């Protein structure tokens, strides 16, 4: 959010200074290479204090007061990582294409923390900041550095062309999904080892927050209207999945999918199309739902005489709402939004940015820099200086004790102390990231971007949203998949999500199903508003 505001202010003529205590863009919305994520985990587990200059106090006037900022990010909790399969030794394995790590002088907390070298890809424009995130092989709109040229043409050529505009109208560039060659798919699947993942770590772009974007959502519209979309490419989500009776199956959602589906009877196809048509203009037929406005959406679906399988598809895979907490109106609104987004860019309503969600804040940072914004990474702020009478911001003091005048100060809430945020209501989100060697649902094409909602076993518990990404999204190495699991927290992240992992994946690779062979799984809990 800060990057969007910074871009808007810079474009409107304001002078913008964007400082970040971290050494990468995006904050808690960033993406990391594999080694970068391990460094991030280590940093969050240690939470070391930093030395700061105390000479700034003499810079404060009598008419001013100071609001101290938090030095620790308490929004990330319960971070842990581990391997389900056998972990071969990777001590002597070097990351392919990695640059030598150089010490960073003058940066607080830089000692003892593993940091990757900055990217050396040419900038998109001369005024753009180079992407200094911990996924060093990529820069938005440029070709990723290939450490294994000639061995993975699909990855190295995916993002060669930059997004285009036609007749001056902003467009959204979609990447191509290509199936693996038949001669490769016919070969015996190769076992993915942990040392391979370490060696190809720069192929990974692992999001701290992963989500699919509605094709007619506010963020996509903002990207197009602001012309920020020229810095990014997107890929369609190719399928919507459902988990029912212990099996993963594909959900038909468009008209063509419904009538081509073999898992629905002809009667079910007519019933589903009739209900979806009603949802598109349900406001015009209030008599059909007004008696159930105080009921849950699940109860309303039962009154429509839909079969149990259709109720499951609509509730968990189309509306994607809670079975117990979602009202009828909320469910109808969610279903309508899903249907309205169909067909804009593909057969599903969702898009995913190539190289991960961390590209979005970097795109807005580039826009800000184009219009004169200044960026300072590894630069923290100690306190905010405000006028006692008016309460307006006058300046900030950085970790060097330097006073910087500013009329406005926009900050992420993790920097604010609990005493300042007494009226803010927080909730916790449990997250897990898995690297797998097979898809949730194997098909002829290996290049699938899937979304799955796993309903809760116990009533009242939250459903788990699962997003599976393939290598053509530039988020993982070839022959692997990156799986993100998210749900509202009830316990620790591992306690919330490990039962779902055990349902969806075979943790014993010898059984031959989708497995988690020789890889690390990451569980963590994140606070948000």
Image (cartoon, rainbow, N blue to C red):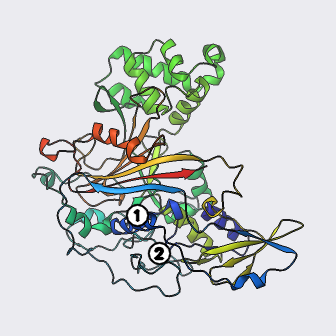
Q: Which residue is mark 1?
A: 41
Would residue 228 be found to the left or right of residue 521 on screen? right
Q: Can you see residue 156?
A: no
Residue at position x 52%, y 40% from top? 341
- Label annotation for residue 192: none
Q: Position of residue 473 (x, y in %)?
A: 36, 56
Of residue 355 and residue 193, the one placed in the foreground of this image is 193
CA–CA distance between discs 1 and 2? 18 Å
Of residue 515 and residue 520, the one placed in the foreground of this image is 520
Q: Which residue is mark 2?
A: 132
Vertical position of residue 297 compared to residue 506: above or below: above
On-image quarter of the N terminus: bottom right
Count of number-bearing discs: 2
Using a 10 Å C-alpha cutoff, classify the residue at mark 2 as few (fewer than 14 neighbours), some (14 to 19) or many (20 or more): some
Vertical position of residue 261 compared to residue 86: above or below: above
Would residue 441 be found to the left or right of residue 357 on screen? left
Q: Position of residue 513 (x, y in %)?
A: 18, 41
Q: Position of residue 238 (x, y in %)?
A: 36, 44
Q: Give the secondary structure at mark 1.
A: helix
Q: Are marks 1 and 2 in contact (CB under 8 Å)?
A: no
Using a 10 Å C-alpha cutoff, classify the residue at mark 1 as few (fewer than 14 neighbours), some (14 to 19) or many (20 or more): some
Q: Can you see residue 338?
A: yes
Disc with the residue nearer the chain's start (1 vs 2): 1
Q: Residue furthest bottom?
A: 105
Residue 121 falls in image quadrant: bottom left
Residue at position x 44%, y 81% from top? 111
Question: Which is more foreground, mark 1 or mark 2?
Answer: 1
Residue at position x 72%, y 80% from top? 404
Q: Give the secondary structure at mark 2.
A: loop
Q: Position of residue 185 (x, y in %)?
A: 15, 51
Vertical position of residue 110 compared to residue 451: above or below: below
Residue 508 falls in image quadrant: top left
């Amino acid at each position: 959010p800060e990057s969007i505001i910074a871009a808007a202010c810079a474009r409107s003529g304001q002078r913008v200074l964007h400082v970040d205590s971290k050494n990468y863009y995006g904050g808690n919305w960033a993406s990391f290479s594999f080694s970068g994520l391990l460094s991030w985990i280590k940093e969050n587990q240690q939470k070391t204090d930093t030395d700061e200059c105390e000479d700034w106090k003499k810079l404060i006037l009598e008419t001013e007061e100071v609001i101290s900022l938090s030095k620790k990010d308490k929004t990330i909790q319960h971070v842990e990582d581990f391997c389900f399969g056998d972990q071969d030794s990777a001590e002597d394995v070097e990351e392919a294409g990695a640059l030598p790590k150089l010490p960073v002088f003058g940066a607080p907390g830089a000692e003892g923390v593993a940091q990757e070298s900055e990217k050396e890809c040419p900038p998109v424009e001369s005024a753009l900041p180079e992407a200094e995130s911990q996924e060093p092989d990529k820069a938005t709109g440029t070709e990723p550095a290939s450490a294994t040229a000639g061995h993975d043409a699909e990855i190295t050529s995916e993002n060669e062309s930059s997004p285009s505009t036609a007749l001056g109208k902003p467009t959204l560039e979609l990447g191509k999904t290509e199936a693996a060659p038949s001669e490769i798919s016919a070969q015996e699947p190769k076992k993915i080892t942990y040392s391979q993942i370490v060696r190809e770590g720069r192929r990974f772009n692992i999001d701290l927050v992963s989500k699919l974007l509605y094709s007619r959502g506010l963020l996509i519209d903002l990207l197009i209207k602001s012309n920020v979309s020229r810095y990014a490419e997107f890929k369609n989500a190719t399928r919507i999945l459902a988990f029912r009776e212990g099996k993963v199956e594909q959900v038909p959602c468009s008209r063509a999918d419904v009538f081509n589906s073999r898992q629905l009877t002809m009667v079910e196809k007519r019933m589903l199309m009739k209900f979806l048509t009603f949802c598109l203009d349900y406001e015009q037929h209030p008599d059909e739902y007004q008696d159930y406005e105080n009921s849950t959406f699940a109860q309303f679906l039962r009154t429509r005489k839909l079969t149990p399988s259709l109720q499951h598809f609509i509730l968990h895979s189309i509306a994607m709402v809670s079975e117990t907490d979602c009202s009828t109106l909320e469910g109808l609104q969610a279903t309508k939004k899903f249907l309205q987004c169909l067909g804009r860019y593909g057969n599903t309503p969702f898009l995913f940015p190539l190289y991960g969600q961390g590209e979005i804040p970097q795109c807005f940072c580039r826009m800000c820099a184009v219009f004169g914004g200044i960026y300072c990474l590894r630069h923290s702020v100690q306190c905010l200086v405000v006028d006692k009478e008016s309460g307006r911001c006058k300046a900030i003091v950085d970790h060097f004790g330097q006073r910087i005048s500013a009329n406005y100060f926009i900050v992420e809430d993790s920097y604010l102390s609990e005493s300042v945020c007494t009226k803010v209501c927080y909730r916790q989100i449990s997250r897990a990231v898995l690297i797998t060697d097979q898809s949730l649902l194997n098909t002829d094409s290996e290049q699938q971007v899937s979304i799955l909602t796993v309903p809760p076993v116990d009533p009242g518990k939250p459903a788990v949203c699962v997003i599976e990404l393939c290598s053509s999204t530039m988020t993982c190495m070839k022959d692997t998949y990156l799986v993100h699991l998210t749900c509202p927290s009830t316990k620790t992240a591992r306690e919330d999500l490990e039962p779902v992992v055990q349902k969806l994946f075979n943790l014993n690779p010898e059984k031959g199903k989708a497995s988690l062979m020789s890889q690390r799984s990451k569980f963590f809990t994140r606070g948000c508003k």
